[in-house]
Amino acid sequence: MRITYLASAIVLITGVIWGIYWYPVRAIADKGLDGAWGTGAITLAAMLFLLPFVWRGRAALGGANRLGMISIAMGGAAFALYSIGFLYGKVALVVLLWFFSPVWSVLIARFLLGWKVPRLRLVAIAVGLVGLFIMLGGDGGLPVPRNLGEWMAFVGGLIWAFATAGMRLKSDLAPAPAAFLFALGAAVTSLLFAPFLEPLPRVAAGDAAAVALGVAVTGGLWWGLSIAALMWAAVRLDPARVGILLMTEVVLGAITAAIFAGEALSTAEMVGGALVILCGLLEVWPTKDAGQHHPA
């Protein structure tokens, strides 16, 4: 029971701190590391933070499942798109489009893995799609992402759905090396995008120390410690509890963006966003078929 409480607290805290992740990302960008350069620096810092822990258990990497390792790196790539998206879109919408990923998860389970999908999961898809259409098309426009940040979150959520399917089925790594591979996938993705999004960064001499500290803290706390802790906690809890506790990220992201960035949501965006959150809750809600994946 103590392990369950500890794991639940870790997942809850992870959701809270990722709900304010957008703030240091934008602060670092304002100091000169704009576009994908900031996320690239942050994730490289996370790799340095995790390297001593990975080195001690490096033998485990050699015998790890390759598909599981690729899935973890894909998860990092998806998170990199999510991170970069905060610089090009409204925070709350970027977070909500990311949390649309349960729809992709259900579709992958049904059509790629051949699992039977409980009726409640089908309801989740319908609710999520309705929420997406209202959120993106409430002003009378086409219900599609409207800027680069929204597209990055939307595509990132799709990649994340594939990555989590692979991680659940094939990953056998301990938390520290898994977090290292996660950061590696994010760093590679960020640095591939960086030259196409913004010119080479120029950090003023007076800001260099602040930028270095911000990069180190953000990489160590968000991408290093919290990801490793989440990977430890998630396997000790049922998926429903993990999914529900992580919803704090959506709430905190919307609240902090409204307070500190003045990014208020329209009525359509709030209604659609609420349906996307409901979709996520329905996707993880226990059913009588939970834990039993049968070929169709």
Image (cartoon, rainbow, N blue to C red):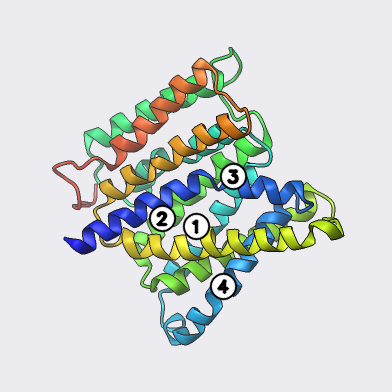
Inter-mark Cα distance, 3 to 4: 21 Å
Tell which circle, 3 or 1, labels the residue nearer the N-terminal end: 3
Residue at figure coordinates x 48%, y 85% from the top left: 58
Please tell me how crowded label 3 is: few (under 14), some (14-19), or many (20+) other residues with Cα within 10 Å: many
Inter-mark Cα distance, 2 to 1: 7 Å
- Residue bearing mark 4: 49
Q: Secondary structure at mark 1?
A: helix
Rendered image: mark on residue 22: 3
If the image is split into quadrants, where does the N terminus sit?
A: bottom left
Q: Tell me the mark number nearer the camera, choosing from 2 and 3.
A: 3
Q: Examine the rendering and report whether any part of residue 196 can be seen.
A: yes
- Residue bearing mark 2: 164
Q: Are marks 2 and 3 in contact (CB under 8 Å)?
A: no
Q: Is residue 62 above or below residue 282?
A: below
Q: Tell me the mark number nearer the camera, choosing from 1 and 4.
A: 4
Please tell me how crowded label 1 is: few (under 14), some (14-19), or many (20+) other residues with Cα within 10 Å: many
Q: Amino acid at mark 3?
A: Trp
Q: Tell me the mark number nearer the camera, choosing from 4 and 2.
A: 4
Q: Nearer the viewer, residue 177 or 33?
A: 33
- Residue bearing mark 1: 75
Q: Secondary structure at mark 2?
A: helix
Residue at figure coordinates x 50%, y 57% from the top left: 75
Q: Examine the rendering and report whether any part of residue 74 can be seen.
A: no
Residue at figure coordinates x 29%, y 33% from the top left: 122
Inter-mark Cα distance, 3 to 1: 18 Å
Q: Amino acid at mark 1?
A: Gly
Q: State the image coordinates of residue 37 (x, y, percent, origin top left).
A: 73, 56
Q: State the image coordinates of residue 66 (x, y, percent, origin top left).
A: 45, 73
Tell which circle, 3 or 4, labels the residue nearer the N-terminal end: 3
Q: State the image coordinates of residue 287 (x, y, percent, origin top left).
A: 18, 41
